[in-house]
Image (tube, rainbow, N blue to C red):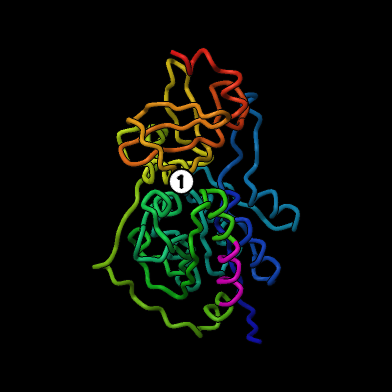
Amino acid sequence: MIKTDKKIIFWGTPDFALPGFQTLQQMGLVRAVVTQPDKPAGRNKKTLSSPIKIEAQKNNLPVLEPEIFNNEFINDLKKYLPATFMIIAYGRIIPDKILKLSELLALNIHPSQLPLLRGPSPIQTALLKGFKITGISLMQLDSQMDHGPLLAQEKIEINPEDNFLTLSKKLTSISQDILAKNVIKYLSNQLTPLPQDHQQATFCKIIKKEDGRIDWLKPAQEINNQIRAFNPWPSAFFDLNGLNIKIFKAQITENNLKPAEILIDQDKLIIGTSQKSLEILELQPAGKKIMRAAEFIRGYQRYLSQ
């Protein structure tokens, strides 16, 4: 087994970054952590720490939480150098002057088969576009977004039942494997970076709340992909006679209905689209909990009968 005395400074913030961080920590590679500052969250605006900060503190690791990348932060960061930066879903663009402090070129995990789906929403976009396969890429960072040379890549099949949550979980598991197999090799100069084929690059955008609005004039498959991609946020939603409804699970049916036409078939709630129809399985009326279609049909007749 390859061994190294070199260390990692881990940059990350959300749950998606946690399994990768835990893997590197268990390998004894992490010297310090950089994460987003504590932020108020929820209705009570209670101040919450990032999952990465919480895990780092459990392991008695130094935690840096810069509001801005000023000289004070740079001086604090230099206390833990030399070390190579590993960046997984940190949440901000890191300036070149800081990336250049990394002992070896900084590393990044991206949840797609680069050069496909460069950008901030590769998991959602893979689901939206109906991809059958996606993956995890380990790469060196350069000055452009998701553009750097590849060090390793693994692929995974997308199940027709997968949504954002389930696919994210699978990809985080693969990210653990790819880090465990490759990071020490990289730190020991035993990996050869391969330039991406930039001619094949595709891109994805920042997801906004309005992207979840359902257009029943689209085909059932496209709407179902939208439901899967946006579970849990921003969720796929529509208005039913003034009632906002989020849909969390559906399946395609052969019912011949007009777009937005609703059919109640015993405990089944079916809505027409431009091609085929959707049976709604799990939904959430505004201000209520997520429920099965049968429960919604029983409790919301006045909206369904208009």
Q: Residue at x 58, y 42 (%)?
A: 37
Q: Residue at x 52, y 52 (%)?
A: 162
Pick the front one: 25 or 126: 126
Q: Secondary structure at mark 1?
A: helix
Q: Residue at x 55, y 37 (%)?
A: 281
Q: Is residue 194 above or below residue 272?
A: below
Pick the front one: 41 or 270: 270
Across and down, in percent, residue 80 comes to: 61, 64
- Taken as a whole, is the magenta stretch helix, strand or loop? helix
Across and down, in percent, residue 91 comes to: 48, 48
On the image, numbered disc 1 is attached to which residue? 229
Classify residue 198 by image quadrant: bottom left
Residue bounds of the magenta highlight: 173-181
Q: Furthest-left residue in view?
A: 199
Q: Is residue 66 left or right of residue 210?
A: right
Q: Residues within 10 Å of mark 1 (few under 14, many from 20)?
A: many
Query: Is 110 in the magenta?
Result: no
Q: Is residue 144 above or below residue 260?
A: below
Across and down, in percent, residue 225 comes to: 42, 46
**Number of residue marks:** 1
Q: Amino acid at mark 1?
A: Ala
